[in-house]
Image: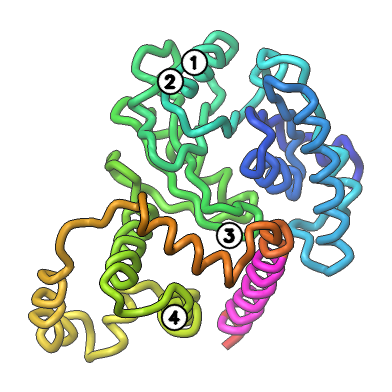
Amino acid sequence: MTFVKMASKGKVGIVGSGFIGRGWAMLFASVGYEVKLFDVEPSKIDDALADIKVQLNILEEKGDLRGHLLASEQFSLVSKCDSLKQCVEDSIHVQECVFENVDLKRKVFKEMDAFASNNVVLCSSTSCFPASSFSEDLVHKAQVIVGHPVNPPYYVPLVEVIPAPWTDPDVVTRTKSLMTDIGQRPVILKKEVPGFAVNRIQYALLNECWRIFRDGIMSVEDIDTSMHEGLGLRYAFIGPLETCHLNADGMLDYCNRYGQGIYKVSETFGPNPKMEGELAEKVHEEMSKISPVENLVERRRWRDARLTALARMKRILNERDKLQ
């Protein structure tokens, strides 16, 4: 495959070169999009490009590289932008990956708006701010949408796609199609809600984990073990609702059997705990014994390797299911 053919899928701009921006750049390049990377601090782009090259080569060596292009071909599609204008102009899609600060996002989207064509999709990676909170006054506000990845996006395929009330329905369709094209699994939120969907589910789990630790029921290690050796194993393949469906003769039977008990237990949960102060310090102390802060880089690599292996196994099993 020639470079011209790889670049012909279109230009994608990435604004912000941190972990999320790097992951997006690798994903878009993996299937042949020309990726332009911009950051207000140019030196960070150089660091990002160096890291992307290393990551792609390691993934290729291990046989875990996504897409059908060589690591060198994918890396050749990612380049540095000297200005936001250069990043946005002529792009079919721009993925914003700046810090989680709504004022900063308003500023960045206002600046992007000045360079945007009537066809580009302006997509935010925000994990908690609805698009309506930073796009209301934009000329191209109908082209703004949220595409919230799960961190790290290269290794976890889910993307939440959340339109603002004024987002053009065609932008939702285009965003879903693009995310599918780069190998992600987009889910659509029909309306904006604080925290979106994945984080709301995650926060419910975290709140109960903190209650269990606070009330002296379990250690931090045993709480996490309950997930990765219990619930997490089945949730890697089916969600909590289908789990219920399969654990009885359908969902209605499950509700009849367990619904009242679930409600009664849930009534005992009480107010949500605050993740601060002495309790936060105790959780941090126990967690640091399991995963020392000075070893977080190595631990993230360990996590990413296992996420890659799990994704590979799921692909194999899914292909096997298709043949049956």
Mark 4 lies on a secondary structure that is helix
Label 4: few (<14), some or many (≥20) within 10 Å? few
Residue beneath disc 3: 156
Q: Give above or below for 319 relative to 16.
A: below
Q: Give above or below for 73 relative to 13.
A: below
Which numbered disc, 2 or 4, marks the residue that appears first in the sequence?
A: 2
CB under 8 Å between discs 2 and 4: no
Residue beneath disc 1: 107
Amino acid at dot 1: Lys
Label 3: few (<14), some or many (≥20) within 10 Å? some
Residue 27 is tagged as: none
Amino acid at dot 3: Val
Residue at position x 81%, y 36% from top?
47
CB under 8 Å between discs 4 and 3: no
Which numbered disc, 2 or 3, marks the residue that appears first in the sequence?
A: 2
Q: CA distance from mark 1 to mark 2?
A: 6 Å
Q: Give above or below for 196 relative to 44.
A: below
Q: Nearer the viewer, mark 2 or mark 4?
A: 4
Q: Is residue 175 left or right of residue 42?
A: left
Which numbered disc, 4 or 3, marks the residue that appears first in the sequence?
A: 3
Q: CA distance from mark 2 to mark 3?
A: 28 Å
Mark 1 lies on a secondary structure that is helix
Magenta stretch, residue numbers: 302-321
Residue beneath disc 4: 222
Amino acid at dot 4: Asp
Residue 235 appears anywhere in the view: no
